[in-house]
Image (tube, rainbow, N blue to C red):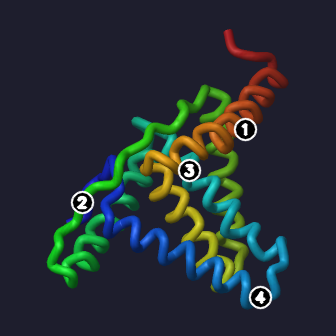
């Protein structure tokens, strides 16, 4: 049974690192062109945004994705007989109302891109979103993402809200 997770296990981290390594390996084998990283990194940013949606449907979906990683990771760790522990949890910065707006727009763009993409690009996008969701639950990555992706998301969304006339 998949449950909603609020942290990442060691096994979940292994699966996340494996997904990241496979994407880096693919990028290296495709000639190390920067444009080849866009689907993965863009989706990673969207995954981080989803993890910041505490209390919303996007955040719940991110929690279930992390729960699936933890469940599969528990089985991976089961081959060692050592059990599975939890990684130190980090807290992302909070989304503003404008940041929520930017997250919805980014999610719609992700969905449109996923629909239009071929199978190899879809795999990179899904992998990127998974890595973003999972790493956003760890202390080190949450600090990095909370000082980069979330403030940019908030700034873009707040700018759009101000452009429309601002909040009352």
Q: Earlier in the sequence, mark 2 or mark 1?
A: 2
SS for tag 1?
helix
Residue 27, picture quadrant: bottom right
Tags 3 and 2 in contact by the CB under 8 Å rule? no
Q: Position of residue 107 (x, y in %)?
A: 63, 52
Q: Earlier in the sequence, mark 4 or mark 1?
A: 4
Residue at 32% in and 69% down: 11
Q: Residue furthest top?
A: 168
In the image shown, does 82 or 147 lie closer to the viewer?
A: 82
Provide the residue designation for mark 2. Answer: 85
Provide the residue designation for mark 1. Answer: 152
Tags 4 and 1 in contact by the CB under 8 Å rule? no
Tags 1 and 3 in contact by the CB under 8 Å rule? no
Provide the residue designation for mark 4. Answer: 30
SS for tag 4?
loop
SS for tag 2?
loop
């Amino acid at each position: 049974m998949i449950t909603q997770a609020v942290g990442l296990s060691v096994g979940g981290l292994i699966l996340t690192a494996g997904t990241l390594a496979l994407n880096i390996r693919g990028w290296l084998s495709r000639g190390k062109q920067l444009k080849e990283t866009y689907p993965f990194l863009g989706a990673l940013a969207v995954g981080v945004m989803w993890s910041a949606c505490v209390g919303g449907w996007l955040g719940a979906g991110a929690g279930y994705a992390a729960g699936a990683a933890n469940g599969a990771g528990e089985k991976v760790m089961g081959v060692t007989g050592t059990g599975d522990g939890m990684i130190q949890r980090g807290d992302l910065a909070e989304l503003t109302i404008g940041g929520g707006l930017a997250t919805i727009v980014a999610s719609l763009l992700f969905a449109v891109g996923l629909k239009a993409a071929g199978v190899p690009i879809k795999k990179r996008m899904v992998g990127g979103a998974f890595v973003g969701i999972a790493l956003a639950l760890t202390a080190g990555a949450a600090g990095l993402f909370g000082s980069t992706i979330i403030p940019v998301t908030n700034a873009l969304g707040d700018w759009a809200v101000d452009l429309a006339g601002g909040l009352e």
